[in-house]
Image (tube, grey):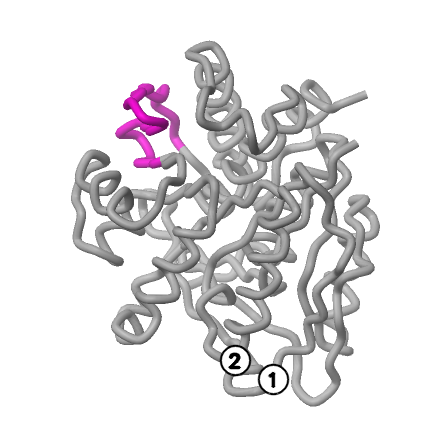
Amino acid sequence: MRKVYTIGDCVLDLFFENDTPVEAKPGGSFLNSAVSLSRLGINVSLISELGIDRVGNQIKNFLVENGVDIRHISYFSDTNSNLALAFLDENKNADYAFYKTRKGLPNAIVFPNDVQKDDIVLFGSFLAVKKEFRSALLTFLLECKERGALIIYDPNFRSQHLPMLPEVLPFIKENMAVAHVVKASNEDFELICKMENPDQAYNWLNEFSDAILIYTANKHGLSIYNQQKYFFEVPPINPISTVGAGDTVNAAIAFVFVRDGIKTSDLAALSQEQINKLAAVTTTFSQDVCMIYDNFLPIATADKYRLR
C-alpha cells in the first residue's frame, strides 16, 4: 500500500468554553490528519518532534494506540513539549494561543529517505514556514517530488502570525509552488493575500503554481479548481467544535487518493465523478469531526470507510 507522510508540530490542545477548560487532546494539524488516516486503514507516518516529558509521552502513547508510525518522530530534552489553548466562541470556532517552546532553537526533526513514487507527503502550518526549518524542509520536498511523490500543502495560516507575513509570504508561495494540491480555507487566503472569494484565490495561486486548489469556506461551501471550477454546497450543522475540521479535510484528500488509486500523473485529468467523490468524502469527514471535541475522525465514521 502507498504510504502517507505528514509533517507538522505536535501539541497538547486545551479547549476552553466561556474561559473554562472543558477538554484536553493531543493535537497539531498534521498529527490530527495522521490519526484520522490511520483510523481509515492508511499506512501513515508522522514526521515531527516531541519533548521528553509527560506531555510528550502522552502524545507518543496516543499515536501508538492509534496505529500511527512514530519512527520519524525525533525527541528533545532542552525544552518542554508544545501547548495550544483553543478558546471556542459562540459558533464553536477557535481563537488560539500557542505556547511553542522551541522558537529560535534548531529543530530535532530528521527526514526519512524512504519516500517512494506515488507516496503522499502532507505538510503545512507554521512549521512549514519556520525560518530554522526551511532549508531542510524544502530540500526534502524537492527530493520527494523528484521521486514522484504526491505533495499536498495546507498553509493553515493563523491571525496570530500576521505580523510575520512579510517575512514568511515567500515561503508560503514557495510551498504552494512545489505542491501538487493546495488545500486552503477562505480565512487562509484573506489573511495571506486579501483574496475574498475562491475565484480570486485561484487566480492569485495560478500566477506561480499549477497546483489543484481545494478551497474550503465552512458553511459557504467547497470549491475545487482543476483547470475548471467545481462548487459544492455543504449541509448545515450545529457544530460542537470546529477544531480539526480542516485537518480532517486534508486526511480525506489523502484517503481518497489512496482508496481510488489516484496518483500524481492522474491529477491533471481527474474526472467529474472522481471530483464528486472527493467533495463528498471531505464534506462528510469534516462535518463529523465538528460534532465532537476530538480533533480526529470519529472511530464510527472511520470504520464505515476503512480500507480492509
Q: Are marks 2 and 1 in contact (CB under 8 Å)?
A: yes
Question: What x and y, as percent, mark residue 16?
Answer: 46, 59
Residue 138 image label: none
Q: Position of residue 228 (x, y in %)?
A: 29, 22
Is 109 displayed left or right of 196 in the figure? right
Count of numbered marks: 2
* Residue in the picture at 21% in, 40% down: 203
Q: Is residue 73 left or right of residue 244?
A: right
- Does the stretch in magenta take in 221? yes
User: Which residue carries the number 2 mark?
Assistant: 132
Near mark 1 (Cα within 10 A), the count class, few <14, some 14-19 or many ≥20, is few
Q: Amino acid at mark 1?
A: Pro
- Extreme residue in the top direction: 273
From mark 2 to mark 1, how far is it between C-alphas?
6 Å
Span colored in magenta: 215-238
Task: Check the picture and name the quadrant holding the C terminus.
Answer: top right
Disc 2 element? helix
**Where does the image place residue 128, in percent across and percent down from the top left?**
49, 64
